[in-house]
Image (cartoon, rainbow, N blue to C red):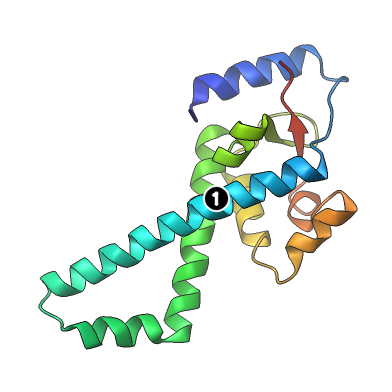
Amino acid sequence: MLNNDFSSSVFDDIEKEKPFFEYATIGQRFLNGLIDMVIFFLFYIIVITLIEILFKIAGKNTEAVNDLLSDWYFFYSLLFLIYVFYYTVLEGFTKGLTVGKTITKTICVKTDLSPIGWYEAFQRSVLRIIPMEAFTALGGFPWHDKWSKTMVIKIRE
């Protein structure tokens, strides 16, 4: 589903028609975020389950796991780390795709329409953590796009 061959052919098409691209709609971006958030939380649940399994293997009791997971600093630190890792790996490896973007036929590119790299993927991931940042998308261009000099466009078929 998400592979470099797919994103390579998408960029070949964009290269041929550089002046002719369409920005992703707010609805597509909302759906991207919704799909990716559901998948992210499933991934987060898997990580928490693995932590619990590791604690059991190490011989720790259930209280030790509960104490760790109920610590707000640990909870939010882990949540942010996994969030940044998840989006960076997805967008970096696929040069701008996530599961949500694949389903809605959109892709993230640099403002010059070239593929994003690991650096831009990491930037976008970190910038998404800013409180209330998601609401900046209602104006058309969220901060994580503006500040990382990227944009989400429709994939031409």
Residue in the picture at 55% in, 50% down: 87
Residue in the picture at 68% in, 45% down: 31
Residue in the picture at 74% in, 37% down: 110
In which image quadrant can residue 116 be found?
top right
The one nearer the camera, 126 or 70, is 70
The vertical placement of 114 against 20, above or below, is: below
Q: Is residue 38 visible from the viewing direction of this image?
A: yes
State the image coordinates of residue 144 (x, y, percent, origin top left): 73, 54
Amino acid type for the residue under numbered disc 1:
Tyr
Horizontal side of 45 relative to 149 (left or right) equals left
The one nearer the camera, 122 or 90, is 90
| Neighbours of disc 1 within 10 Å: few (<14), some (14-19), many (20+) | many
User: Which residue is tagged 1?
Assistant: 87
Quarter of the C terminus within the rendering: top right
Q: Is residue 150 visible from the viewing direction of this image?
A: no
State the image coordinates of residue 74 (x, y, percent, origin top left): 42, 80
In which image quadrant can residue 139 be found?
bottom right
The one nearer the camera, 35 or 144, is 35
Horizontal side of 74 relative to 110 (left or right) equals left
The vertical placement of 66 against 52, above or below, is: below
Q: Secondary structure at mark 1?
A: helix
State the image coordinates of residue 143 (x, y, percent, origin top left): 79, 57
Horizontal side of 69 relative to 87 (left or right) equals left
